[in-house]
Image: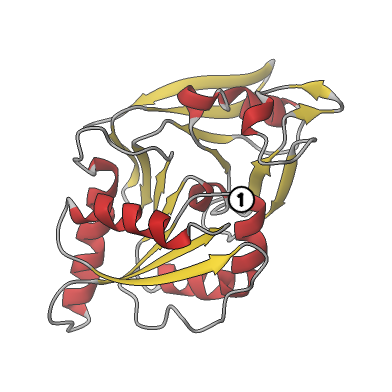
């Protein structure tokens, strides 16, 4: 599982996508696929879905060829189960996390099963935020008290935790250094809304697999965990 904190690489390296595409290519080979891996690119946007999907494909393509299967949904519409049956990789894009939860809910079980079958998942921004069992999907106040910038609230007032896909057991924040969302994860953990998690910088990926955790890309990842006297925060540096 690859969780990317959003943003577009200035140097066009696509480093945060590289491991995902390599795993998808390996899955394709093991499945007897001749040619590029089949990537389901899922976006839920308000009118610019195809443009956003094209940018995601371009980032991934820096690491190799792919056969993209774009599933572009307008906010408020609902995905059709079964669309991931022949995918070698699942790439879920960015936008409004509440809209992604609503539109992709019929696919959650299918996504979990595909990942269990060895298909890699890459969540970009909103796609990363909805990956956990308990997804932190927005808001900027807790009990009426501001805890993070309102501009990053995803059109929500109070910080909201919702049931996500269920691929990881801690919450995920994105655009951490760029949008100041680390404080929202810290406050939500302190308030007992979540058991902690990771806040991911732009251009950076947290890779979760059988070998533990890895960090790649341009930035850092901030790990937040409950502690005896509040919360603890440490920084995981990217390997490159």
Residue placed farthest to the top in the image? Answer: 229
Pointer 1: what residue?
Answer: 97
* Residue displayed at 25% across by 32% down: 10
Residue placed farthest to the front in the image? Answer: 47
Is residue 30 in sight in this rendering? Answer: yes
Where is the N terminus found, in terms of image quarters?
bottom left
Is residue 164 in sight in this rendering? Answer: no
Q: Is residue 39 left or right of residue 146?
A: left
- Say which element carries label 1: helix
Where is the C terminus found, in terms of image quarters?
top left
* Residue displayed at 23% across by 44% down: 14
Residue 196 position (above or below residue 105): above
Q: Nearer the viewer, residue 116 or 33?
A: 33
Q: Is residue 192 left or right of residue 236?
A: right
Q: Residue 67, percent across and down?
A: 24, 72
Q: Residue 54, percent across and down?
A: 33, 58
Disc tally is 1
Q: Nearer the viewer, residue 31 or 90?
A: 90
Q: Is residue 232 left or right of residue 65?
A: right
The quadrant where residue 205 appears? top left
* Residue displayed at 45% across by 55% down: 93
Residue 200 position (above or below residue 96): above
* Residue displayed at 49% across by 48% down: 128
Q: Nearer the viewer, residue 32 or 229?
A: 32
Residue placed farthest to the right in the image? Answer: 143
Q: Residue 19, percent across and down?
A: 24, 51
Local crowd at mark 1 within 10 Å, few (<14), some, or many (≥20)? many
* Snapshot colouring: secondary structure
Q: Residue 159, percent across and down?
A: 75, 36
């Amino acid at each position: 599982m690859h969780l990317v904190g959003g943003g577009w690489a200035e140097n066009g390296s696509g480093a945060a996508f590289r491991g995902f595409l390599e795993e998808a290519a390996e899955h394709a080979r093991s499945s007897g696929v001749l040619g590029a891996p089949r990537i389901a690119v899922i976006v839920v946007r308000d009118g610019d879905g195809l443009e956003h999907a094209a940018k995601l494909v371009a980032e991934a393509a820096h690491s190799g060829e792919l056969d993209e299967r774009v599933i572009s949904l307008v906010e408020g519409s609902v995905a059709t189960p079964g669309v991931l049956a022949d995918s070698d990789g699942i790439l879920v894009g960015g936008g409004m996390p509440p809209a992604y939860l609503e539109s992709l809910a019929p696919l959650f079980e299918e996504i979990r099963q595909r990942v269990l079958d060895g298909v890699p998942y890459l969540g970009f921004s909103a796609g990363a935020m909805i990956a956990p069992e308990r997804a932190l999907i927005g808001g900027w106040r807790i009990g009426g008290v501001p805890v993070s910038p309102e501009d990053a609230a995803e059109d929500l007032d109070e910080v909201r935790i919702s049931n996500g896909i269920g691929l990881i057991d801690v919450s995920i924040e994105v655009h951490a250094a760029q949008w100041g969302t680390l404080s929202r994860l810290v406050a939500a953990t302190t308030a007992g809304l979540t058991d902690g998690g990771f806040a991911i910088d732009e251009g950076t990926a947290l890779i979760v697999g059988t070998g533990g955790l890895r960090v790649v890309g341009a930035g850092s990842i901030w790990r937040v965990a409950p502690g005896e006297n509040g919360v603890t925060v440490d920084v995981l540096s990217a390997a490159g």
